[in-house]
Amino acid sequence: MKSSSAAAAVRTRDSYPMSAGRRKARITRICVSCGLGAYALVTLYPLIWLYLSAFKTNEEFYAHPFGLPQSWQWSNFARAWEVSGMGLAMLNSFIVTTLSLALTLLLGALAAYILARFTFRGRALIHLLFVLGMLIPIHSTLVPLFIMMNQMGILNTYAALILPYTAFELPIAIFIVAAYLANIPKEMEEAALVDGCGYTGIFARIMLPVSLPALATVAILGFLRFWNDFAFALVFINSPAMKTLPLSLSVFATGYSTDYKLTMAALGIAALPTIIIYILFQEQVMKGMAAGAVKG
């Protein structure tokens, strides 16, 4: 009896024509979904084109640059890895990127904690100076940095890249983390102080875990900058044993020609760590970018 009543209710409900408001809402959702799908396709197409081109020969690349490979040349990746010495270059990039990120996150979190949670004379001025640091054109400092590092004797070392990477990434790291920490209730620190926890313990046990979304955002932005940097590595590194990944990619291009099949294969290998890191931490990045947008 109940089942027949329920079936009758469903038939009665479905027999009513869809209201104009519901129809409009459904059409809007379909249009938005189609628009987002088209935008995603346009955004991802360069990456798709890169990997498709990595499987082609040079002749096929010139003849059909936007078509599918007629025969998939898997050997391009092995050849690109061998010719460019990407193993050593990737190791150097990994060391430089890891140490630069560690310094950036540690110093940026410490400075942001002081600026966001303490009140002292000159705090606003110091915060303003860090914000102004984001406006400095990085490449305009190449010549003075080269002269300075040459006098210090640290050219062709990891320090020649780690120090400027950290210095130029600190302003945006402090800006993001400080905005996130400013929204944390003061009661958390007061309760920790009452329990006998010092400021070092508050920073290590409360502020760092709470600010993980902001730190993840800083880590992603820093990783992209450090891993893909070419200008600093080109100017400060001359030794083949110290070359980073972007420098190893330049061996496929000369003043007269470019081996596109190996270039695309090498670019595909170099882009994989960036893609994997972003996929793993994309949720944290979104949370960190929205830090400070809403109070309370």
Image (cartoon, grey):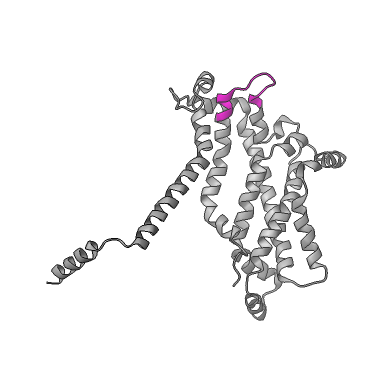
Q: Is residue 81 visible?
A: no
The quadrant of the image that shows the N terminus is bottom left
Instruction: Confirm whether residue 274 shows in the render.
Output: yes
Is residue 74 toward the left or the right of residue 16 in the image?
A: right
Placement of 267 over or under 134, stated as above or below: above
Magenta extent: 251-264
> In front here: 170 or 59?
59
State whether residue 56 is above or below residue 16: above
Whether 145 is among the magenta residues is no
Residue 257 is one of the magenta-drawn residues: yes
* Residue 282 percent coordinates (x, y): 53, 52
* Residue 152 relative to residue 32: left or right: right
- Dividing the picture into quadrants, the one containing residue 83 is top right
Q: Is residue 167 left or right of residue 153?
A: left
Residue at the far left in the pictured view: 1
The percent position of residue 175, horizontal first and vertical second, equals 70, 59
Q: Position of residue 56 (x, y in %)?
A: 49, 24
- State the image quarter where residue 179 is shown: bottom right
Q: Is residue 106 placed above or below 223 in the rendered structure?
A: below
Q: Locate the C terminus and report the quarter of the image it occupies.
A: bottom right
Residue drawn 58% across and 31% down? 266
Residue 152 position in % (x across, y down): 85, 42
State how many labels appear.
Answer: 0
Residue lying at the far right in this picture: please name it. 151
Residue at image coords 53%, 28%? 77
Q: Residue furthest front?
A: 20
Which is more toward the observer, 22 or 227?
22
